Image: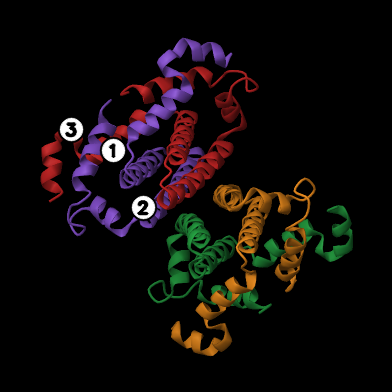
Chain colours: A red, B purple, C orange, D green
Amino acid sequence: MNDVLKQIETVLAERRNADPDSSYVASLHHAGLDKILKKVGEESAETLIAAKDAEHFGKKEDLVYETADLWFHTLVMLSHLGLSHTDVLTELERRFGLSGIEEKASRDK
Amino acid sequence: MNDVLKQIETVLAERRNADPDSSYVASLHHAGLDKILKKVGEESAETLIAAKDAEHFGKKEDLVYETADLWFHTLVMLSHLGLSHTDVLTELERRFGLSGIEEKASRDK
Amino acid sequence: MNDVLKQIETVLAERRNADPDSSYVASLHHAGLDKILKKVGEESAETLIAAKDAEHFGKKEDLVYETADLWFHTLVMLSHLGLSHTDVLTELERRFGLSGIEEKASRDK
Amino acid sequence: MNDVLKQIETVLAERRNADPDSSYVASLHHAGLDKILKKVGEESAETLIAAKDAEHFGKKEDLVYETADLWFHTLVMLSHLGLSHTDVLTELERRFGLSGIEEKASRDK
């Protein structure tokens, strides 16, 4: 489970220069940043809608699906701009003080 | 690096029922789903803005920061609704066929 | 110019129950609220992207086009839920105190 | 009712260079385009949330309020970039063929 984001990054890098007609990832890169960002915005909206339905109907499959879509398109965005999921995880680690978890725990009190 | 999301999930669970005045995570849960979703939408917009600035000015720190904010608030959303980042990673793994990476690679050609 | 929103509302009402295959408006109503909201979110993202391009390149046509798309899909949303642009304008009028513009002007100082 | 957008535009122009401490509009312009766009994205998310609640609970006041917020911040955005609501209405008029409404009606069949 731990390496899923790393494995996806490898796949995204492989497909980046593939034939746009045969790979969705390649078609996104080929269309450019605005197309990728439009998808991020669209998947964000779909995540909100699915979360409201999860709240009202208790059905959570759609929310998992839409959140996966949102994360996926942010990964393509990072890849398009020469960034990696590890940049984001490092920022989260820094913010949460996870390299020194005791220090964080004391700070949060 | 691999366990950052898992460590964050543990921290989020610990803080869920903390004093809303002392913990941002607790204050989000206390305010409710709509507040959390509003933050997801807001961070999505900030991610788009930062990505456009990364494109125009080559400055990528803000994009890493905003994407971390976006992922963080989706993690709080998942936690609020009894879901986990592992649900999302499992969906991504399924979609990418990462449990059988060779099969996926052949399918993508 | 003043009656454009009213004229659009009339057209939207006429097309609401048209053949989904021949009218985009009818196809949106037929697909349902989630489809309409997904479009609102998508056009919002495109508006942000176009605004950043207007800032960087001074080219404003796309921003006008995307804002029109955003307003249009909010009008379809209102229509789908039995609301009217006049409800929104009445709220804006109330907020700005436009029925008593002098009072507002003094309040704003 | 018809002149609400025009009256708002006048008020927005008056307040643009007001004291940021005394006018919300002035504070938005002072903070800059990114702040205004962040608000557009935020209000878009709140509109989606309110629309889902209108669907589930039949309570429509919040949706009118949030849509007004969304339109208001797009008007501030247009003003900030030297554009007007009339640019957007002209685009909608062109698109709907409202200057020649019969022609449009036949085109839509």
Secondary structure beneath label 1: helix
- Amino acid at pointer 2: Ile
Quarter holding the N terminus of chain D is: bottom right
Considering depth in this image, is A18 or B54 the residue closer to the camera?
A18
Q: Which residue is mark 2?
A: B36
Which chain does tag 3 point to? A
Q: Chain of mark 1?
A: A
Report x, y in % for residue B38: 41, 55
Q: Quadrant of residue B101?
A: top left
- CA–CA distance between discs 2 and 3? 26 Å
Q: Amino acid at mark 1?
A: Leu
Specify few, some or many for label 1: CA neighbours under 10 Å numbering under 14, 14-19, or 20 or more.
Answer: many
Q: Nearer the viewer, residue C48 or B32?
A: B32
Q: Secondary structure at mark 3?
A: helix
Which residue is drawn at the image coordinates 73% and 74% (left, top)?
A: C2
Image disc number at residue A99: 3
Looking at the rendering, which quadrant does residue A74 occupy? top left
The spot of residue A50 in percent (x, y) is 47, 46
Residue drawn 64% across the image and 66% down it:
D84
Residue bearing the label numbered 1? A92
